[in-house]
Image: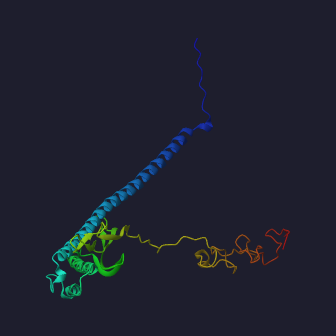
Amino acid sequence: MKTIRQLPQPLRGERGATSVLVIFMMIVLVTLGAFAITSANVNYKFSARARDWTRSYYTLEDSGETFAKDFDLCLAAAENDAIAYGEAQGYAQASYDGIPDDIQNINFTLYSQGFTARAYAESLERVYDYFVNQQMQDFAAAYPDVTYSQADQTDQARDYAAASVAIDFVSVDNADYHLRVALTSLPFPFEVGLGDDGSYIATRTAQTTRYAVQSWNQWQTPVQLDNSGPQLWNGDLGSGNPFFDNNSGGSDGSGDILGNPAQSQDDGSIDLQDSPAASDGAASQSSADPGATDDGDTIEIIGN
């Protein structure tokens, strides 16, 4: 004889629990999925921005390095021209091809008055500064956006005309990425002394570079924020707060601080819930009997 056991029936209060659990799990999964998609999108945008900036960084750095190399080549060419002038003893001639008469007259006068080592060095430095200025004309033609200036400076008790160039490179990929480069030439890197035969010779100094870097800065165009929209409340409760200035509620009794008018009751009293607080901190009372209520009962007011 078989015995059939009846399975317990679910309680009526548990009906629909599975559906609620499934719906809850669906909401959780959808929320997590939306968060994952949003997070991935943000990470993608930041990664793309970092990629663009890195690519522009190296492109701008390459442009800056090329600019510095070309500037150094111009200074090297001026240096070679000045050395050739000294080797040809151009200072001992009344005129010299390629040198203006005013500069050549000064050098020739110094030579005629008794040439010294210092006079020889000044002659070479003078023609070097002139040749640098000439080279900068071609350099400016190669870089139309360059800013060029030449000003007298003193370095290690030596006066010379320093050539300064500055340029702002803009990335071809993004016009908001820039590289600002400013370079200045150093003095003529030679000093004059006596050779073994008693003649003056020019030897290179310990100066290893022909120019100095004044600035080498990469920057991005500042983002202009739009402040024309509604402003956030700064927490100030005093004057200037739009929540108080733009509404008529407050101490005049016309309404609350949000501008809601005071509610009058049938008996002519003012609802204490909507009436403003008095200046001494006590709640305003009804203009009728302060102890009266709508149903005629009386209440006792304790305090002032």
| Front in this rendered view, residue 190 or 55 | 190
Query: Can you tell which quarter of the image residue 245 is in?
Result: bottom right
**What residue lies at 37% left-to-right and 58% top-to-bottom?**
50
Please tell me which residue lies in front, 9 or 133. 133
Q: Residue furthest left?
A: 97
**Where, quadrant-wise, is the N terminus in this rendering?**
top right
- Location of the C terminus by quadrant is bottom right
When asked about the image quadrant of residue 167, the answer is bottom left
- Residue at position x 44%, y 72% from top? 226
Residue at image location 41% in from the left, 54% down from the top? 43
Display colour scheme: rainbow
Name the residue at 60% across, 32% down: 10
Residue 296 appears left or right of 227: right
Q: Give above or below for 235 relative to 154.
A: above
> Which x, y percent locates residue 71?
25, 71
Q: Relative to the observer, which residue lies in front, 201 or 197? A: 197
Residue 112 position (above or below residue 87): below
Residue 71 appears anywhere in the view = no
In this view of the protein, which residue sits in the foreground, 230 or 201? 201
- Left or right of 202? Residue 299 is right
Residue closest to the far top: 1
Q: Is residue 25 visible?
A: yes
Q: Is residue 18 left or right of residue 121?
A: right
Residue 69 x/y as whole percent: 25, 66
Question: Where is residue 283 shown, x and y percent of the image?
Answer: 76, 73
Where is residue 157 shown, x and y percent of the image? 36, 78
